[in-house]
Image (tube, grey):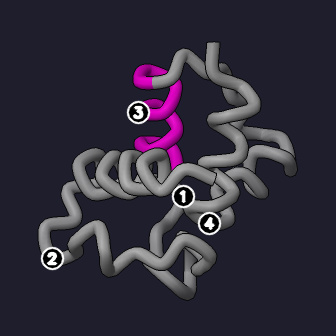
């Protein structure tokens, strides 16, 4: 997997959610984004989902279990984006 894509996704998370106290290198690719790890919540997921849709042209269905799995970690998000971007 491309480290560049991981860095891009981490920066998108920081910028979208205005996480001013976190640097890209502090986000671990395999750590959970929600609850443990970064500690994001459902509002953050919605904002991040919209940002990913706009940036990568990807459609997401917020109600599916699959979508929840895509937001499990940076690794999961990068895989999802690579598989679905247009």
Q: Which residues are magenta?
A: 45-55
- Spatial distance from mark 1 to mark 4, Cα to Cα? 14 Å
Q: Circles 1 and 3: CB distance less than 8 Å?
A: no
17 shown above or below 5: below
Which badge, 1 or 2, comes first in the chain's sequence? 2
Mark identifier at residue 21: 2
Which badge, 4 or 2, comes first in the chain's sequence? 2
Q: Which residue is mark 1?
A: 42
Q: Circles 4 and 2: CB distance less than 8 Å?
A: no
Viewer-closest of 69 and 29: 29
- Which element type, helix, strand or loop, lies under badge 1? helix
Which badge, 1 or 4, comes first in the chain's sequence? 1
- Spatial distance from mark 1 to mark 3, Cα to Cα? 14 Å
Viewer-closest of 86 and 54: 86
Q: Nearer the viewer, mark 1 or mark 4?
A: 4
Residue displayed at 64% across by 56% down: 71
Residue displayed at 69% across by 57% down: 76
């Amino acid at each position: 997997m491309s480290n560049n894509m991981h860095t891009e996704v981490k920066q998108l998370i920081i910028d979208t959610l205005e996480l001013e106290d976190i640097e890209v290198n502090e986000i671990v690719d395999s750590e959970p984004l929600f609850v443990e790890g970064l500690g994001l919540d459902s509002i953050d997921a919605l904002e991040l989902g919209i940002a990913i849709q706009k940036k990568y042209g990807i459609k997401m269905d917020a109600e599916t279990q699959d979508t929840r799995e895509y937001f499990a970690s940076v690794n999961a998000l990068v895989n999802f984006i690579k598989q679905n971007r247009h």
